[in-house]
Amino acid sequence: MKRVPIVALSSLVAVAALGCGKKEAPAPPPPDVKVATVLQKDVPIYVEAIGQTRGSTEIEVRARVEGFIQSVDFKEGNPVKKGQLLYTIDPRPLQATLSQAKGALAEAEAQLARAKQDVVRYEPLVAKNAISRQEYDTAVVVQRAAEAAVEAAKATVERAQIDLGYTRVTAPDDGLVGKTEVYPGTLVGRGQSDLLTHISQIATIHVRFTVPERDYLFYARRQQERAGTPAASAALPFELVLSDGSVHPKKGAIVFVDRNIDAATGTIMMEAAFPNPGGIVRPGQFARVRAAVDLKQGAILVPQRAVTELQGIYNVAVVGGDDTVEIRMVTPAQRIGNLWVMDAGLKAGDRVVVEGVQKVRPGLKVKPEVVKIEEDDAAAPPGAAPAAEAKGAKG
């Protein structure tokens, strides 16, 4: 029996293995992605900023005399009327001061009466040379000094009466009173006018905010453009978007623009006023204010989730007519709800990947499922993104 050499046998095994290796694995199927045709519509261009609300008038109620708080005479967080009693400071020390001042006034008035009598008595005597002219002149000077002492004593009494009145701390104006900063037994007014509470007028709510110099110039020029239109008499309306994404039902207007640009930040302070029926908006809330200063016609919008960003470069995955992916660089502009306006990189009719972006790469064939961009997302106000995203996730 012939023996097959070991080397030859090894060669046959290698050839057989090589023959088996020529079988290629089947190509993976195209990944499933969701695509949507870009939305094209006219959209408003906003100047917007984040600010903080405050009352149309903010009043600090402070102690004007020293004493112990005797009672707090209001309910915190409730409306108060002008002249309503808020605090009572122990009046007894100031009542004693007033009584002392009145006693000093009575004494000064008695001294004045005596000085007047001396002048009346000396006047005929000096005419008859019964007394010297010097004695008469001295009596006149004493009378004048007594009159001055009476005026000073009256001023002291008036001051004591005013101070006694300050022991009843009343509301200087109508408004909404805040929490009390002091309680019965607290010593106030020693060396400083202690803050007792705040009163805010919230029938009109104000929002103070800062905007970049560029946005201010855009707003100011837009106002100048409106000067020759029928709407010139009305200020450019502002909207107030609250922290929950809801839009305040009443439009507002700018009531204050600071005189200068802050050189450190390149921003300018502005303040807008909004009617506040029912007092829903309270001072101290953070909110977004915006004004539509222009209309961008035929703007291209895509969902924000379709846009990827790396080191300041923004891209979207565009699916062509043959279902091949192209990664295209875009230039985003403002965000409107859950959508993003694209200034460059896309055109009407383009299909973009809105779900499954992480699966694609340039030149890859995909299996697209066409979905529709919800136009409601474009109407959602800035700041409502969480709600809009939840809605998009359901789609």
Image (cartoon, helix red, strand yellow):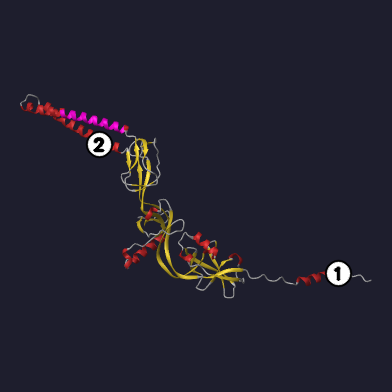
Q: Position of residue 308 (x, y in %)?
A: 55, 64
- In the picture, the disc for residue 158 is 2
Confirm whether the magenta stretch covers residue 335.
Answer: no
Q: How many marks?
A: 2
- In the picture, the disc for residue 344 is none
Is residue 308 visible from the viewing direction of this image? no
Residue that label 1 marks = 9
Q: Decide: few, some or many residues near mark 2? Use Cα within 10 Å; few <14, some 14-19, many ≥20.
A: some
In front of the other: 225 or 379: 379
Q: Nearer the viewer, mark 1 or mark 2?
A: 2
Q: Position of residue 62 (x, y in %)?
A: 35, 41
Is residue 358 visible from the viewing direction of this image? yes
Residue located 33% across and 63% down the image: 234
Q: Main secondary structure of the magenta part?
A: helix
Confirm whether the magenta stretch covers residue 105.
Answer: yes
Element type at mark 1 = helix
Picture quarter with the N terminus? bottom right
Residue 220 falls in image quadrant: bottom left
In this image, 102 relative to 38: left or right? left
Which residue is outermost to the left?
Answer: 128
Residue 91 falls in image quadrant: top left
In this image, 163 relative to 379: left or right? left
Q: Decide: few, some or many residues near mark 1? Use Cα within 10 Å; few <14, some 14-19, many ≥20.
A: few
Residue 47 falls in image quadrant: bottom left
Which portion, as a residue range, is magenta? Answer: 93-113
In front of the other: 277 or 52: 277
Q: CA distance from mark 1 to mark 2?
A: 127 Å
Q: Label 1 sits on what residue type?
A: Leu
Q: Label 2 sits on what residue type?
A: Glu
Q: Is residue 124 above or below residue 330?
A: above
